[in-house]
Amino acid sequence: MAGLFESAGGGGAAIALDEVEASILRSLEVQMLELIGPGPGGDGEDPLAALFAEGPSEAPADPALARLFPDAYGDPAAPADEEARAAAAEFRRFTELDLRARKRDDALQVVRALDGLGGAGVLKLAAGDCLHWLGALNDLRLTLGVRLEVSEEDEQGLYELPDGDERKPLVMAYLWLGALQESLLEAITD
């Protein structure tokens, strides 16, 4: 997969995607939307009530979601005093729904842009759209990194997996997403 972002001027970026690249990226973003779940008001709930909804006070049990929605105070795996746990729970209760909504919006922006592309072609992003894409690509990469149990120490080992390793397709997606993310960041800072 060779499609990488290039500067389109004015803080925007462009990327040429073939049908396979667009399809894979769209599929990953749809899976991200499923992982994040619907937001308040998404299931017929009163939109006004959703404004006053409070989020969860506990960290998600799914390690990927816990990585996307980390505790604000300290490492949840490390022993913390009761005050730190209470502060983290309170912070999560009032911020997680907004963070989920932003991540959902980022993923939806990518899906809509890919749908507008109609399969293959050059996708041009305005400066504001680039920020949504950066967030969405980062979320995908973090999620795949957790699923693959990637750590900073062993990321180099991903390049050495044998072709028969069942993780190889996810590793290829993880590395590609990293290249997309890096090229987008470079494109908007040129």
Image: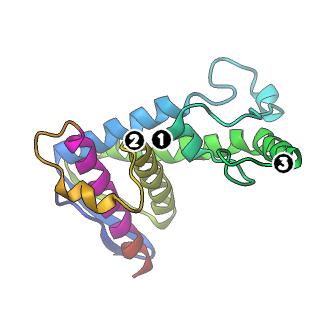
Q: Residues within 10 Å of mark 2 (few under 14, many from 20)?
A: many
Which residue is at the far top? Answer: 44
Q: How is the image coloured?
A: rainbow
The stretch in magenta equals 167-184
Q: Residue at x 71, y 54 (%)?
A: 74
Q: Earlier in the sequence, mark 3 or mark 1?
A: 3
C-alpha distance separating marks 2 and 1: 5 Å
Which of disc 2 and disc 3 is earlier in sequence? 3
Q: Which residue is the site of mark 2?
A: 111
Picture coordinates of residue 169, whole percent (x, y): 21, 42
Task: Residue at the far left: name it.
Answer: 163
Q: Is residue 32 above or below residue 187?
A: above
How many C-alpha atoms fall within 10 Å of the one at disc 1: few (<14), some, or many (≥20)? many
Q: Residue 154 appears at what percent x and percent y?
A: 34, 58
Which residue: 81% across, 44% down?
85
Residue closest to the far front:
79
Question: Residue visible at 64% across and 30% down?
Answer: 39
Q: Nearer the viewer, residue 114 or 59?
A: 59
Within the magenta stretch, is there residue 168?
yes
Task: Say whether residue 158 is left or right of residue 131.
Answer: left
Question: Circle 3 sits on which residue?
Answer: 81
Left or right position of 58 against 119: right
Queried whether the magenta region covers residue 41, the answer comes back as no
Report the residue that reaches farthest toward the right: 83
Whether tag 2 and tag 1 are in contact, CB under 8 A, the answer is: yes
SS for dot 2: helix
Tag shown at residue 99: none
Identify residue type, mark 1: Leu
The tag on residue 108 is 1
Predominant secondary structure in magenta? helix
